[in-house]
Image: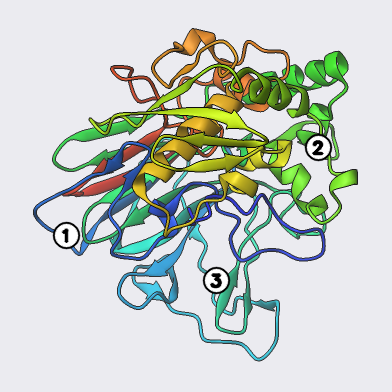
Amino acid sequence: MSSAMSSGGPAPHRRPARPLSRRSLLAGTAAAAAVTAFGLRDRASAAPATCELALENRSLPGTVHAYVTGHEQGTGRWVLLRPGGGVYRPESPSSTMTPLPVDCAIPLRPAGAGPVVLTLPQMYGARVYFVRDNKLDFFLNPGPALVEPAFATPSDRNYGRIWSFAEFTFNPQQLYANISYVDLVTALPIGLTLTGDATHTVAPLPAGAVQRIADELVAQAARDGQPWDKLVIRASNGSVLRVISPQNLMAPYFDRPDQMPFRSAFTGYIDRVWQKYRTTDLRIDLQGGRGVRTGRVNGDVLTFTGGHSFAKPTSRDVFTCNHGPFTNNPGDSDDRKALLARLAAGFNRTTLLTHPDQPNGPAPSDYYRDPSTNHWSRVVHANTPIGYAFPYDDVRPDGRPDVSGAAHDGNPRRFTLTVG
């Protein structure tokens, strides 16, 4: 994901090159080591130049194709894996939205027939797409810039197709991959296994989870009047294709805040938090032995010991974790980044009113209990055991297991993705 974590989704008039959703790890510089809310993962020796990539249809009837896209390590150029092996490096076209001239669809074997195995070179800001009973349309803009499928834009040719993706970065330090629900959940469940110095497995979305998530969001809309039901994207026959996160519904209205969906979803909660910490200390543990910072609100600014301050956020800032006071600036100090992550997580989980010690005060059972919470995250987590549901979902109390849906290894030998 990009250093800005999330573009918030596509604009209504064009497809973005890549609406990535997690932080600097997956679309930072090619040499960047993996970064989480807990800091850098260091490795003394370099990762191998290549590893095996195994793509497998576990259970789906019909056809399944895969696409592998990313930025080439060392050059930064867009590359796609070819179905027969090797990479395709597109040239810059003369006009925008030029169809990709090479078919890079990788046909998977029938369900249960084993994986297709390719050689994966180092690349960053990368995705593996799967599409069922169809292919995907990719385009090129001058540069070249690869224009990838947009899941929240009805005019996109791929909008009505059943497709999904996983994200990864494979750089000189390690291969890092995740199953992210920051942007969407789909009717095409993906699992991954990364084998290297250890074996890391991330389970796919459970059977029936997408339908349950859709049903629960429709019910939540009826309870509070917020447009949770509008997050559900259906096929022409009424079946659920995917469910998108709130920031993707909000994004086309960022320049029209008075018309933006969910513009008031957190307003009352934010007001109550700001009022509480005018007279109460908010204590945020930076974790990893970095100490606790204490904050108080003065005027409309929350200021912590050490001098880091945050203006009063809006609902957009909370949902995206990357606007207003929560903007992720690469040049910010590590302390500020750690404060931002834990503050944004506390707002999304609505634990700030009940627990002045963050993130170690609340247990996961305390998350999402306020009526004004991020119901997208609440419902997603209620229906899947792991996976990011907002950009700082890897913030967790000390001693708690990591359920972010990420896997990383400094000596990757085989990276397996399954669908179905």
Hey, what amino acid is under mark 3? Asp
Identified by mark 2, the residue type is: Arg
Q: Which element type, helix, strand or loop, lies under badge 1?
A: loop
Disc marking residue 48: 1
Of all residues, the one furthest to the bottom in this rendering is 94
In this picture, residue 53 sits left or right of residue 307 = left
Where residue 132 appears, as percent x and y from the top left, is 61, 46
Location of residue 196 in the rendering, given as x and y in whole percent from the top left corner = 17, 43
Looking at the picture, tell me which residue is in the foreground, 229 or 210: 229
284 left or right, relative to 246: left
Mark 2 or 1, nearer chain start = 1
- Per the model, the C-alpha gap separating discs 1 and 3 is 28 Å
Question: CA gap, disc 3 to disc 2?
Answer: 42 Å
Mark 3 neighbour density, 10 Å: few (under 14) some (14–19) many (20 or more): some
- Residue under label 3, please give it: 103
Residue beneath label 2, please?
Answer: 263
In front of the other: 406 or 104: 406
Q: Nearer the viewer, residue 227 or 304?
A: 304
266 relative to 84, above or below? above
Amino acid on which disc 1 is placed:
Pro
